[in-house]
Amino acid sequence: MTRVTKNMAASASALPLALSRREKGEQERELVRLAQSGEEAAFEELVRRHQQRVFGLVSGILRSREDVEDIVQQIFLKVFLSLKRFDQRSAFSTWLYKISVNECWDYLRKKKVRPLVYEADLSEEQVSRLDGAASAVRPPESPTKRAEVRDLLERMLENLPDQDRALLVLKEMEGFSVEELAVILDLNVNTVKVRLFRSRAKLMDVYRRRLKTKPAFPGAGEAKS
Amino acid sequence: MTENKFNADFRTSACEQYEAMLEDHLNGDIGGAEAANLTEHLKSCAGCAGALDEAEKSARLLRVGEPAADPGAGFARIVMARIRGEMDSREEKSIWRPVVSLAWKLSATAGFALVLLVMFEATHQDRNQNQRQHEFAIVAADEAPELLSDEARLPSNRDETLILMAEDGHAKH
């Protein structure tokens, strides 16, 4: 690792809050420039900076978690190989996320397998727990219950079309803003908002269908306990 | 439990223009005249009010989910190792590429030469056969003319034709 890249990596990790957005942008542009000139350490630093977000993005779009790591590696390889063509007119992160999204859609297109999740496979207790989480102001505090509700939520999300699921997960779980989603998905900001709102309705539709197969939830579960 | 009011029957086509605003409201990104307009609409539209209620529930549900875990410090090193492996294999391929290309060219030339050889051999054999037949005809004509058919006695040039005509005329007289 060269001295410049070492310094940049050190300053980025030591003072993440002290750096303004503009400074971070400048630093990233410099890293990209160094990586384009063939410095591997600079690219490694870029990977380190973006790996978590790309992981979130990919696992938000793909349903099978086993393939996420492999796909993310593939994405960074693709980015490395086409880095010389990147003209820095947009932010590196935007370009990276766009490549990630396209890679995910390609993967889903190739796989074409959509695991069927049957809706009548929840116990009454599970349904009431889910309903409790939906009505509660705060998510359940117990890690076990949180994990269980998360698992149920995951199963519900699997009933949604890929695009709807991706939008909801990226927005609500991975923390992408509407504007970011518009850029990386090549959509108008308003379109993203409308699609998000409709995806929410679809999710709740799945949720209601689950409830219909079970008796009404007893109380508000976690919310009122 | 509130009924699912997010139903097309409860909403008019005019409600579609409020969808983006409802999402903004959910994210706390609305204010001023837009917020007032939406509030006014929600008072008179049970469908949109129900849809907003449902969307809020969905947001609460989704909040239970957590972002994907950080793959860890070692991940970047794994990625770099994969990149290096890929670059090495590409380089290896590029070293052998001229050799492979030459081999292809050589095999194409050899194939072409083989076709030419086969064609030449075929024509040559044909010619030999014709020559042999011709030689046989000459020998047969010299040594055992009775074995030859009339066809074999056909004149092959102008002089022979004249001789044959003269012989025929002489025979008739």
Image: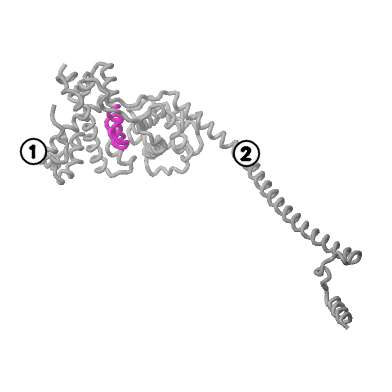
Q: Nearer the viewer, residue A66 or A125?
A: A125
**Labels 1 and 2: the sequence-earlier one:** 1
Report the side of B96 relative to A168 (left or right).
right
> Compared with residue A51, is residue B22 higher up or lower down, i.e. above or below?
below
- Residue A53 visible somewhere in the drawing: no
Crowding near the residue tagged with mark 1, few <14, some 14–19, many ≥20 C-alpha atoms within 10 Å:
few
- Placement of the C terminus of chain A among the 4 image quadrants: top left
Scheme of image coloration: one colour
Q: Is residue A158 within the magenta segment? A: yes
Is A107 on the left or on the right of A130, as rendered?
Answer: right
Looking at the rendering, the stretch of residues picked out in magenta corresponds to A155-174
The amino acid pointed to by label 1 is Lys
Residue where numbered disc 2 is placed: B95
Comparing A137 with A42, the one in front is: A137
Label 2 marks a residue whose chain is B
- The part of the image, by quadrant, that contains residue A86 is top left
